[in-house]
Amino acid sequence: MTIASSTARATLEQLLLARSADTLAAQLAPKHHPAPQRPRGATDTSDEAIDRRWALLAAAGIDVAPLREALLDEQARADADTYARSVEYFVGTVKLPIGLAGPLRVNGTHAQGDFYVPLATTEAALVASYARGMQLLTECGGASVALLDDGVSRAPAFAFRTIHETGQFVAWVLAHLDALRGAAEATTRHGTLKDVRITVEGNHVYLLCEFRTGDAAGQNMATIATQALCEHVVAHCPVVPTHWYVEANHSGDKKASALSFLSVRGRSVSAEVRIPADTLERRLHTTPARMMDYWQVSALGGVLSGTIGVQGHYANGLAALYLACGQDVACVAESAVGVTRFSLDDDGGLYAAVTLPSLVVGTVGGGTALPSQRACLGMLGLAGTGHAGALAEVAAATALAGELSIVGAIVAHEFTRAHAALSRRPVRLGAPDDAPTGAAAATTGAAVPMPGTDA
């Protein structure tokens, strides 16, 4: 990463404005005095262990009483044991507000019906915007959604002395795929090795191992299975690698990459809707032609800025849904890669579609078993076995709703007004409804319908 010389000069001058070069050097120098005591008992959630961790903060001079009251309330302490498999050094819980968007009508290969979608966020206007998009989709008969593919990858790498050895190694792997599959699948009741893709780079070989993981998101399942596969390779392959790694940063795990855009990591889903012109004008206060014009401008803007895929803000809705429903929120990095497309129908309406090739979601395992998160999956009717495909389709339909709403607000010049109206409202505790009503609801561009309005 480079910066302009003028910026570098200004930064240096700012750093030296209130201190000498010697003082700055002393601030940046390594410090070797004894460190404070670290937390202990990683998975111990007993009252004694929790109290000891809070005592560390108190010993550091922090006023822990108000912090403890906020983070370790009666419910958090009562549920402490349920968090032992989800976090280490437990001290409490963080509460996020959850908004209920919907109903969202989904006509999917796995999800069928009207869903109320819980979204956990601290960003005002987000739930209102998605709710508006969901209302539009539902009024048009719902989003048609198809689960296209699924697979979770792990990419071990093996290093050799020469490219000749890599060729011998690849030949052995291809001849023993059934044995590798057996070693991997012996570690799991639910996972299967779908494919092994091979990349040779000089004297390095990457094996992109793709697994089907049932209703789990499956990252841990894939890791454990890949470890067993690698150990089988090392134990039986006559071409011995100089070293190997269970993951060599080639799987696309928790990062936006061309691989997660062109292939599948998680579940690949596409959703579409056709919106009549009069419905679009009534709900989003604009026209199909204007929406199409904006899509062309924004697609080019994405290309000019180097984005992977072309979309408006998948990460907003996905992060809120993932937080609410116990998903691995870091996987939003690859999940929010994809393409939004608008085009004009022959009858003058708008065709809108989203394709998200790498939605990493599950309805069993991980954070889905935690009390609040399982409750949110329960709101969707998608808790437990048999629902991961449906959750992926609901996530894609949610992304489509968000794309329509945000583009409509920008095109109708209501985007800024909506955020100003919803994010700068004074807090009125106990008020029956803080959402704008009447004319305010009609002009925010992100408000859910209010009594007496058609916003």
Image: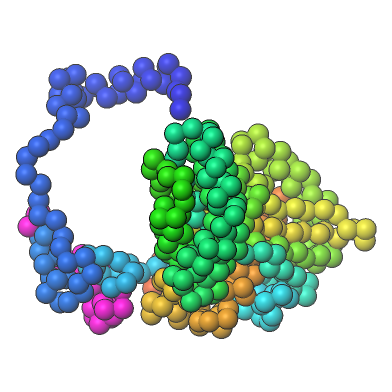
The residue under the point 74% across, 47% down is 295
Give coordinates of residue 438: x percent, y percent: 63, 69
Which image quarter holds the C terminus?
Answer: bottom right
Is 198 located above or below residue 153 in the figure? Answer: above
Left or right: residue 314 versus residue 320 is right
Visible residue check, residue 368: yes
Question: In the rendered structure, which segment of residues is drawn in magenta?
Answer: 59-83
Color scheme of the displayed model: rainbow
User: Image quarter for residue 70?
Assistant: bottom left
Q: Position of residue 184 (x, y in %)?
A: 48, 65
- The answer to whether residue 452 is magenta is no
Which residue: 39% across, 73% down? 429
The structure residue drawn at horizontal position 21% and vertical position 65%, both measured from the top left corner, is 42
- Vertical position of residue 7 compared to residue 327: above or below: above
Relative to 238, 455 lies left or right? right
Depth order, front residue of 94/284: 94
Q: Where is residue 399 in the image (x, y as percent from the top left)?
A: 63, 62
**Which quadrant of the figure has residue 133?**
bottom right
